[in-house]
Amino acid sequence: MLLRFLVLALLASAGAQAQVLDFTDAERRAILRHGPWPAPWAPDPSNRVSGAAEAIGFGERLFFEPRLSPSGKVLCATCHVPFRGWQDGRARALGLAEAERNTQSVVNVRYNRWFGWDGAGDSLWAQSLRPILDAREMGGSQAQAATLVRSDPELSCGYARTFGAPPPADDALVLAGIGKALAAFQETIVSGRSPFDDFRDALARNDFSAMKNYPLAAQRGLRIFVGRGNCSACHFGPNFANGEFHDVGVPFFVAGGADPGRHGGIRKLQSNPFNLLGPHNDDREGASATRTKHVALEHRNFGEFKVAGLRNVAQSAPYMHNGSLATLADVVRHYSEISPDRLHADGESLLKPLRLNREESADLVAFLESLTERASTLPPRRPGTPCRP
């Protein structure tokens, strides 16, 4: 009887072992660098209401306010639709007119260093103002937005509760406040834990029984991601993004010319009166403005676009800065077949064609799909005190 029990135990153990790949020490270290999740976060020092309940409630109200657009037809949630993964599912954003770029999701946006495909925003609150002022998106203006907040009793009350004083006569100050409240709300939009996170944490504690719950296809795709594919060279850390900009061989030609990408973004950043070098930065120590002060315009920046975070990536199709790739399978195919001739020649390129076969491509897609959250595990938002003017 004892012998039969030992045989059955050995067979069960062998069957279980077949469900977990034998990752090398180097692979384990690479995998563990993609967590833990949720990642630590601290309020934005450039935004004095970052993390404040009143600001979060006021920002949420503004996020769904159509009158920030003079037409009354476009709001932040027009492009950042909650039930579409906080983006719009379109190849290119559509406000008052169609733009040249894909709408980025605002999920996990609080972990970014630069904002927008070209990094023209150096803070989330400054980036939040860009669609309001863009003629193709919301088509508003500094004066119109400030007048709305001052004249509407509910919005004026929300502003006063958030900043401790009624909206001032200075339009720029009111507009900066709008951006800071919008940022405070967006900072709360964070993805929950995914099947990958459960596997990563089980790997960290050598919990074999928990590791075997992660599908083998996803494990094989993960091995490609951190190994042969070298995907984690750019998509690393808990949010699977290095926060920088690269040319990945996606065409950047648009109607009437070319999209300059990061090159144009740096120019916009440097001329933006709401950048962190300006008077609206609440960080009196000045540390938050260091990267803005030292950003340099280089020729190689032309045609570079931001590395997107990969959490919930299965929910944010279509892909790339111009929405030119419809599915994750298309993205994997792009990197599998990429031509080095399409890349800039500045320095040695990290990108080389992966030449994945059909099974390997499917495994990599399975891994990317495993980054989708099951459900949010963060505390619920605390709305600000309702305004009843």
Image: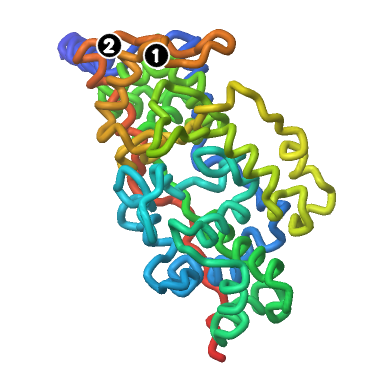
Residues tagged 1 and 2 counted as in contact (Cβ below 8 A): yes
What type is the residue that disc 1 sits on? Gly
* In the image, residue 299 above or below residue 257: above
Residue 274, image x, y percentages:
69, 55
Kind of element beneath mark 2: loop
Q: CA distance from mark 1 to mark 2?
A: 9 Å
Residue occupied by mark 2: 356
Residue 158 in which image quadrant: bottom right
Left or right of 313, for residue 76:
right
Residue 34 or 322: which is nearer the viewer? Answer: 322
Left or right of 357, for residue 147:
right
Left or right of 364, for residue 135:
right
* In the image, residue 143 above or below residue 343: below
Residue 295, image x, y percentages:
71, 33
The C terminus is located in which quarter? bottom right
Q: Which mark is residue 288?
A: none
Residue 19, image x, y percentages:
26, 18
Kind of element beneath mark 1: loop
What type is the residue that disc 2 sits on? Leu
Q: Is residue 280 visible?
A: yes
The N terminus is located in which quarter? top left
* In the image, residue 339 above or below residue 202: above
**Label 2 neighbour load within 10 Å: few <14, some 14-19, many 20+:** some
Q: Give the farthest residue toward the bottom.
A: 389
Residue occupied by mark 1: 229
Residue at x 48% of width, y 59% of height? 135
Disc nearer the start of the sequence (1/2)? 1
Residue 118 in which image quadrant: top right
Residue 82 or 87: which is nearer the viewer? Answer: 87
